[in-house]
Amino acid sequence: MKFTDLGLSAGILRAVAAQGYDTPTPIQAQAIPVVLAGRDLMACAQTGTGKTAGFTLPILELLSKGRSRPKQPRTLVLTPTRELAMQVEESVRTYGAHLPLKSLAVFGGVGMNPQVQALARGVDILVATPGRLMDHMQQRTVDLSAVEILVLDEADRMLDMGFIRDIRKILAVMPKQKQSLLFSATFSDEIRELAQTFLHNPESVEVARRNTAAESVAQRVIHVDRENKASLLIHLFETHGWHQVLVFTRTKHGADALSRKLDKAGIRSAALHGNKSQGARVRALNEFKDGKLVALVATDIAARGIDIDALPHVINFELPNISEDYVHRIGRTGRAGMEGEALSLVCADERAYLRDIEKLIKRDLEKLTLPGFEPSAVPSVSAPPPRGNGQRQGQRQGQQQTPRGNAAGNGQKPAGGQKPGGGQPQNAGRRRRGGGKPQDGAAPSANPGHRSGQRHH
Ligand code: AMP
């Protein structure tokens, strides 16, 4: 199938072609006809699947055909983070380049006034984070009474960030009669419940999850003591000549501290998290994309929606305590068929998280130790039973292995299937973060020590 088969008009097709795309991705091929037909949609798709164009293109088509309204937004797209809001709005502008439609992104962390003025001048497609949109609603600087199409993008993440009450209030001021689209990486009970409240007879579409699709990502674990993680990471940078590495930490403070250590070691980096100003985030992202920064050290929330294709390396400096976040993280690499590597530095007290992750992705990750960085408390290794030609063997400390293939170059798998020991809480899983009013683009920080919680999936 080609984009030209989808019934989109010439101006939109021209803009798509200018991006170099001629074949729709699976989510686009499924979603575009549904949206063009005016139906509600419930789509299970993660970032990187092309979902943004999947809703942007048909919405542009519908709006360009419909009756224009001089002032009020006709489409509202809600996103969890500022970065995603900016990217969605940029897509709207890109694909709508030849259409007379106006778009605007409103999000927190920047002044209200320019947004107020732009809203007053009139906007067709409004992309917003819930918190800032609520501010505009309270100040009566936005009028949502003419919304014809509503999109909830990354709805699961919005719920995780505690935006549900805001979303309900926003839904309440919009016309009941409208077309609604919901995009989510997961379909939890909570998402289904929300969907039932505002989707009418929706068509469901689903594309393969990244963790099953992206076989091109090599996922490896290095066991290392917590206090040696930073020096190990620096060692890896120095020995591999890496560039464009996205490094994940669990906390904002951890991101800042690690970025400082990397800089000290001559590895140019920046920290990206919710406490950074909008300007600082945009600058860091641009410098990273331009290759001026070798590493970006980010928290999960800040990294959501960052649109960088084909990152060669993603490093989990700390494992996420929510297993699904691991999948989101590694989805940053190995895109578009490019080879990618996701490397996790795992210390003793993270082994339970590792077990959760392996359970979720239904596979055992390859485990390594590096000479000079062996963990002091060796994971209780139970060597897997010898298989076939006996090539898979239990891990031997000090064996020379490097993250990308072992140095021996003999194709021998280093300790695959080995399971670290340690107690395992039964109910460790995804849980709601925080309880208070969330800030736009900055989730309340998760409490890494506390692992009990409800399972939503
Ligand atoms: P998204 O999942 O919307 O964040 O999109 C992921 C990336 O895929 C973005 O960089 C898009 O520009 C790109 N993309 C979207 N549609 C296509 C397509 N049909 N062919 C190739 N790349 C695409």
Image (spheres, helix red, strand yellow):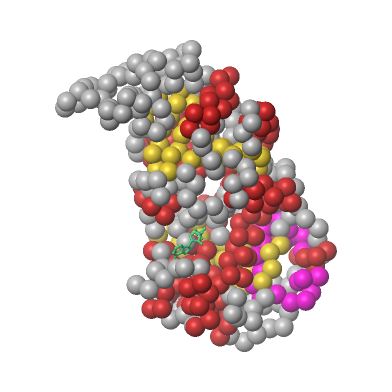
Left or right: 208, with 324 as reference point? left
Q: Position of residue 2 (x, y in %)?
A: 38, 73
Residue at 43%, 35% (x, y): give it. 357
Residue closer to the observer: 168 or 298: 298
Q: Position of residue 91 (x, y in %)?
A: 58, 66
Q: Is residue 261 above or below residue 23?
A: above
Residue closer to the observer: 154 or 270: 270
Q: Is residue 344 magenta?
A: no
Q: Is residue 155 above or below residue 420?
A: below
Q: Quadrant of the C terminus?
A: top left
Left or right: 371, with 111 as reference point? left
- In the picture as drawn, the residue positioned furthest to the left comes out as 388
Q: Is residue 47 above or below residue 42?
A: above
The dominant secondary structure in magenta is helix
Q: Position of residue 330 (x, y in %)?
A: 47, 43
What segment is highlighted magenta in the picture? 117-136
Q: Is residue 130 magenta?
A: yes
Q: Is residue 358 above or below residue 118?
A: above
Query: Is residue 350 among the parts visible in the rendering?
Result: no
How many numbered circles does the render carry? 0
Residue at 63%, 45% (x, y): give it. 292
Query: Is residue 408 among the parts visible in the rendering?
Result: yes
Residue at 59%, 50% (x, y): give it. 289
Left or right: 388, with 289 as reference point? left
Residue at 43%, 43% (x, y): give it. 340
Q: Quadrant of the N terminus?
A: bottom left
Residue 114 position by quadrant: bottom right
Q: Position of residue 372 (x, y in %)?
A: 48, 16
- In the picture as drawn, the residue positioned furthest to the top comes out as 376
